[in-house]
Amino acid sequence: MIPTHFKGWAIPGPIPPGATGLGPEPGPGETLDSISGRFRLFQLTDGHRFSTDDVLTAWYGTSGCPCARTVLDLGSGIGTVGMIAAWRFQGARFVTVEAQEASVALARKSAAWNGLLDRYDIRLGDLRDPSILGADEQFDLVLGSPPYFPLDAGVKSEHPQRLACRFEMRGTVVDYCRTAADHLAPGGVFACVFPIRPEEQSQRVLQGATQAGLSIVRQRPIVLREGEDPLLGLFLMHRAVDLPERFRNQTHTEPPLCIRRADGSVSVEYSAIKLSFGFPP
């Protein structure tokens, strides 16, 4: 029997094939974890695991472009961002681009488990490679969670999957902006997450947008714990040529989103956001 509730929460959304026993099973060193409603995500036990950054990118992008029919997920990793977006956009078609074979293999298993194979095209390749996407491929919504740090910054994980998710092994936020701009449909939206501290990081996002001909229309700082300074930011961008000239150089900064209260409990707003993408509050 397929459960309808989890700890008092009524599970929303479709019933995927995997929930009826028709999907793939976790292999050695893999786990199968809840992500949106009854959708599940295959992850490596000791590899990269989905994070708050990923789910916020999916939420912000799908909220900022609620009528998307086509979606591109750049540097898609194990598929977290795309799977959440696919759960929210039941009729949309997806293309995802990821350079790590291990992550692509996991994403393909998740797509099969969730019943997405007929509308979910997972491509193995470097997003900077012009051959990975056709010149005429355009998308209403482009999503991206770029790596945050140059290779010469910080202590690096020895696990290759984790390393590439945080350090710029294959491109920077500038490359993500450029690829997004090249493949946005008229009026389309590019949504991404990136650090806003120190100030140099925030400037890198602005530089990437400017060089790609994008305008940052909205941004929202993220406070991981009440009382702390925001370290991350969510960004919504449009191609500048798609906007009225007066609107091309102005950005609306929304109030910070606080993830956890000072006592460590999840904030009311973030609980409501989690409900919006099918995750227990």
Image (tube, rainbow, N blue to C red):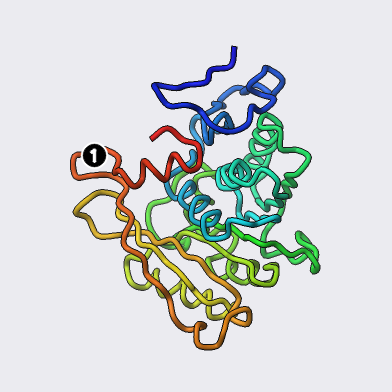
Examine the rendered structure and indicate whether residue 249 appears above or below residue 234: below
Q: Disc 1 designates what residue?
A: 264
Which quadrant holds residue 179?
Answer: bottom right
Decide: is 174 above or below 225.
Answer: below
- Residue at the (57%, 29%) spot, across then down: 38
Left or right? Give the position of 80 relative to 121.
left
Could you tell me if residue 78 is visible in this image?
no
Relative to residue 75, is residue 130 drawn left or right? Answer: right
Residue ID at (42%, 32%): 280
**For the residue marked with disc 1, what is the amino acid?**
Gly
Residue density around tag 1, few if under 14, some if 14–19, many if 20 or more, within 10 Å: few
The N terminus, quarter of image: top right
Left or right: 214 as drawn, with respect to 52: right
Q: Nearer the viewer, residue 171 or 206?
A: 206
Q: Secondary structure at mark 1?
A: loop
Q: Position of residue 94 (x, y in %)?
A: 70, 50
* The C terminus sits in image quarter: top left
Nearer to the camera, 235 or 160: 235
Quarter of the view holding residue 239 = bottom right
Marker count (numbered)? 1
Q: What residue is shown at x 72% (from left), y 20% (from top)? A: 22
Q: Position of residue 2 (x, y in %)?
A: 58, 16
Place residue 23 in its image quadrant: top right
Q: Does residue 255 appear to the left or right of 148 in the view shown? A: left
> Horizontal and vertical percent for residue 91?
70, 46
Q: Is residue 233 visible?
A: yes
